[in-house]
Image: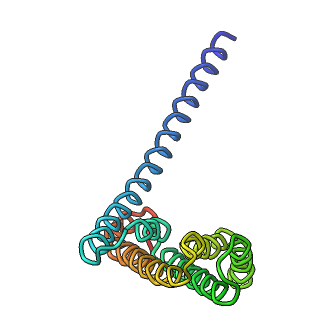
Amino acid sequence: MPLMKSLSASLARVRAAHGRGYKLVVLMQRRLIGLRYAARVLISGVIVWLILDQVMHMDPLWGLISAVVVTDLKVRSAMNNFVSRMLNTLIGCGIAVGFLKLFGASAWVVLLAMAFAIIVSADLFREQVSWRVAPITAAIVMTPAYMLHNTQAAQAAALRRTAEVVIGAAVAVAISYATAGLFRSREAAGQPADDEV
């Protein structure tokens, strides 16, 4: 009996140590993935900031947001994010400008344009997460026209927003593609690589 209890206690300690080791490995893998993602976002952010702020003298905020949204460890996913972001931005901008031309600038028009942007986006995209970009874009484009009572402000905002998003998203895809090869050596070592071209 004492031998069985001792053996059982030893086995329990081995299982506990194994469990802690497994949790540590999972944590380290997650941290490595997080570090790789952070590095890509950092590189993309620096490039977007330099292009928009230093070269084009534009506010880099929406370019930076687009870079974060589009960046992915998988190049294919980054490209899908890019397409979704671009189309939803264009949908939101187009609906905003169209609603302003047809109905003018009022709080109700902004809300109706946002709802219509969701309907159009929902018809085109399966992922509900991507449905949010079009109405947010419509609101961002229409708000200056509503606040300033000037529809020209909306057209200028639509052009700026689209340019910022295009630059941020394109840089993110380029960085995802450029850094994908850095982690392919893991495949040769028998570990699955997270990156794919």
Observer-nearest residue: 5 or 175? Answer: 175
Relative side of 157 to 133, left or right: left
In the displayed structure, 166 sits above or below 33; it is: below
Observer-nearest residue: 95 or 74? Answer: 95
- Identify which residue is drawn at 38% across, 54% down: 35
Please state the horizontal and vertical placement of residue 92, each as a whole percent of the image.
61, 80
Observer-nearest residue: 166 or 101? Answer: 101
Q: Quadrant of the C terminus?
A: bottom left
Residue 29 seen: yes
Colour setting: rainbow
Relative side of 86 to 5, left or right: left
- Identify which residue is drawn at 24% across, 76% down: 55
In the displayed structure, 10 sits above or below 188; it is: above
Give the image quarter of residue 127: bottom right
Please state the horizontal and vertical placement of residue 119, each as a whole percent of the image.
75, 80
The outermost residue toward the top is 2
Q: Quadrant of the N terminus?
A: top right
Residue 194 seen: no
- Identify which residue is drawn at 29% across, 74% down: 57
Please state the horizontal and vertical placement of residue 179, each as a whole percent of the image.
33, 71
Relative side of 109 to 86, left or right: right
The outermost residue toward the left is 54
- Identify which residue is drawn at 58% across, 76% down: 149
In the displayed structure, 52 sits above or below 32; it is: below
The outermost residue toward the front is 149
Please state the horizontal and vertical placement of residue 70, each as a whole percent of the image.
48, 71
